[in-house]
Image (cartoon, rainbow, N blue to C red):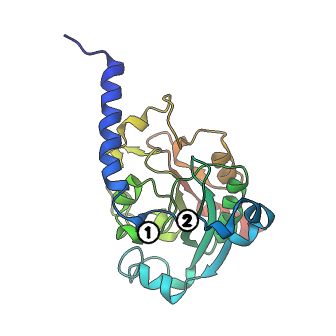
């Protein structure tokens, strides 16, 4: 007896959610913290921008990164990086604290970008440093964690990723996986490669997230021809060369 395709797809989605759920709800440190009651809705709306900050890496933040996302001899120095603190909303509309390390060249743009997404209520489930996952990119993606800097190679190559430079951001990566050479990452996200299907946290062309990045000169991996990386937005070097020529 042949089982209808829609039933097989439903089973695959269920198994994926169970697999990812086991990883995603393992530790409290892997989750964005909810804004305390003293930072209620009215206070946040009155002075939202004050919650969005850019700073140099403190000793405390840098100690979390050493030997994990930050590796000696990598392509950028500590002085090249900046620490962002932001607010973001999840799908339930809860206001959460988020953090990110990125290149100083795009830090102010990202601060403005995440403020813009917060104000329109664009959902981002989690935003923690990848160091909370021991810089394990797969574990971070399976937890649907939005992140930027991580000194690592491009999948399947010996080339440094734009993440190694802090010039690429992955948004809601569980529901917006990468598909390269037939390999899906995170590995449990196969159902989410069907971009015609309906599911939460999906990035689509023209949505507020896509528009916010592209209006600031970023390139979207979901628009690539030879592979797809729906979570991925990166800043091309041509943008900096253009800026220097002005």
In this figure, which residue is indicated by the disc labeled 2? Answer: 167
Rendering coords of residue 17 (x, y %): 35, 42
Q: Front-most of 38 and 149?
A: 38
In the picture, residue 55 is in which quadrant? bottom right
Residue 240 shows in the view = no
Above or below 96: residue 192: above
Instruction: Name the quarter where the N terminus is drawn.
Output: top left
Q: Front-most of 37 and 32?
A: 37
In the picture, residue 104 is in which quadrant? bottom right
Above or below 169: residue 192: above
Rendering coords of residue 102 (x, y %): 56, 70
Rendering coords of residue 169 (x, y %): 54, 59
In this figure, which residue is indicated by the disc labeled 1? Answer: 150
How far apart marks 1 and 2 lie (CA) works out to 10 Å
Instruction: Name the quarter where the C terminus is drawn.
Output: bottom right
Q: Nearer the viewer, mark 1 or mark 2?
A: 1
Rendering coords of residue 241 (x, y %): 67, 66
Q: Residues within 10 Å of mark 1 (few under 14, many from 20)?
A: many
Q: What residue is rendered at 69% in x and 52% in y?
A: 212
Q: Which mark is residue 90?
A: none
Residue 169 shows in the view = yes
């Amino acid at each position: 007896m042949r089982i209808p395709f829609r039933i097989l797809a439903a089973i695959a989605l269920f198994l994926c959610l169970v697999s990812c759920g086991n990883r995603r709800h393992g530790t409290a440190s892997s989750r964005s913290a909810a804004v305390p009651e003293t930072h209620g809705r009215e206070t946040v709306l009155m002075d939202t921008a004050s919650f969005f900050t850019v700073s140099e890496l403190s000793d405390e933040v840098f100690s979390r990164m050493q030997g994990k996302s930050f590796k000696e001899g990598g392509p950028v120095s500590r002085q090249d990086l900046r620490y962002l603190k932001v607010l973001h909303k999840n799908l339930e509309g809860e206001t959460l604290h988020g953090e990110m390390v990125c290149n100083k060249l795009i830090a102010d743009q990202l601060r403005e970008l995440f403020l813009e997404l917060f104000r329109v209520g664009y959902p981002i489930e989690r935003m923690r440093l990848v160091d909370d996952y021991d810089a394990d990119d797969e574990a971070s993606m399976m937890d649907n964690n939005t992140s930027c800097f991580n000194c690592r190679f491009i999948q399947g190559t010996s080339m440094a990723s734009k993440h190694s430079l802090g010039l690429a951001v992955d948004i809601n990566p569980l529901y917006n996986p990468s598909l390269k050479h037939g390999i899906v990452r995170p590995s449990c996200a196969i159902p989410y490669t069907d971009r015609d299907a309906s599911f939460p946290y999906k990035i689509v062309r023209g949505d507020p997230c896509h528009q916010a990045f592209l209006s600031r000169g970023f390139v979207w991996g979901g628009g690539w021809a030879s592979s797809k990386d729906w979570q991925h937005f990166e800043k091309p070097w041509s943008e900096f060369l253009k800026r220097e020529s002005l």
